[in-house]
Amino acid sequence: MIAQVNGKILSKNPPEVVVEVAGIGYAILCPMSTYYQLGSTDTQVLLYTHLSIKEDSHTLFGFITKDEKSLFRELIRVNGVGPKVALAILSHLTVGSLVECIANEDADLLAKTPGIGKKTALKLIVELKDRLDKVEFSSGVMTSGIVQNNNNPNAKKALEALQSLGFKAKEANSMIAAIEDQTLSTEELIRQALKNK
């Protein structure tokens, strides 16, 4: 398995980039989010990669962050979503907006991705909702729908508790986001959120 590639960009032709490592040129397919962050040719680059092996091809997919790679791997685990579709999704939505989209069950936004219909979008949300809770993102994206503008470490637990009480993820998220005090315990956060409701 090729986990990462560190080398010089030889050529760029969306969505493919060719990176030279020790005299070997690796053709790597990237989501457009990664592609736009890459420098011009002759620039040194580090890409986190996923090698997809099929009967007739070995395809290398590259990502500028570990979070993109993790999300890509979760996407391709969904039945009916192949690497090309996963690449299209990551080209359309950032890691943060995709995680938020799944947490808030926003199938309409997901369905705007080329090649994704409403049915596939709903399937993705159902399959990824619980699975993303187990993925550790390094960039501060919280899988329960809070993107880390709330610095309280208890916010995620409070959000999960509100959801288990029957609040939708989007509603629970806005209830927690409205609380300015970053020092509250989980119980205090829940109490405050319910008061503000």
Image (cartoon, grey):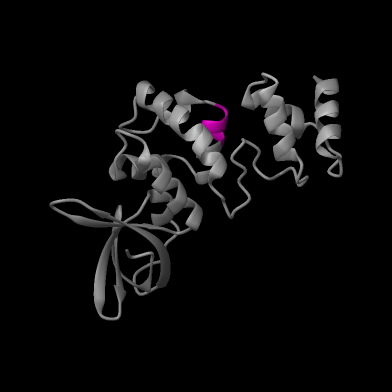
- Asked if the magenta segment contains residue 101, the reply would be yes
Decide whether the magenta segment is chiefly helix, strand or loop.
helix
- Asked if the magenta segment contains residue 146, the reply would be no
- Place residue 13 in its image quadrant: bottom left
Rendered location of residue 118, percent (x, y): 38, 22
- Place residue 172 in its image quadrant: top right
Rendered location of residue 176, percent (x, y): 75, 32
Decide if residue 71 is on the left or right side of residue 20.
right
Q: Is residue 197 above or below residue 90?
A: above
Quick check: can you spot residue 96?
no
Q: Residue at the spot x=63%, y=27% of the render?
A: 169
Quick check: can you spot residue 136?
yes
Q: Residue at the spot x=34%, y=30% of the render?
A: 116
Split into 4 quadrants, where in the image is the C terminus? Answer: top right
- Of 129 and 147, nearer the camera is 129
Split into 4 quadrants, where in the image is the N terminus? Answer: bottom left
Q: How many callouts does the rendering have?
A: 0
- Of 38 and 69, nearer the camera is 69
- Of 155 and 24, nearer the camera is 155
Decide if residue 21 is on the left or right side of residue 108.
left
Decide if residue 93 is on the left or right side of residue 195.
left
Q: Residue at the spot x=42%, y=24% of the render?
A: 122
Rendered location of residue 137, percent (x, y): 56, 51
Look at the image and give the residue range highlighted in magenta. Answer: 100-104
Rendered location of residue 106, percent (x, y): 51, 26
Residue at the left extreme of this rendering: 56
Q: Is residue 154 above or below residue 24?
A: above
- Of 49 and 110, nearer the camera is 49
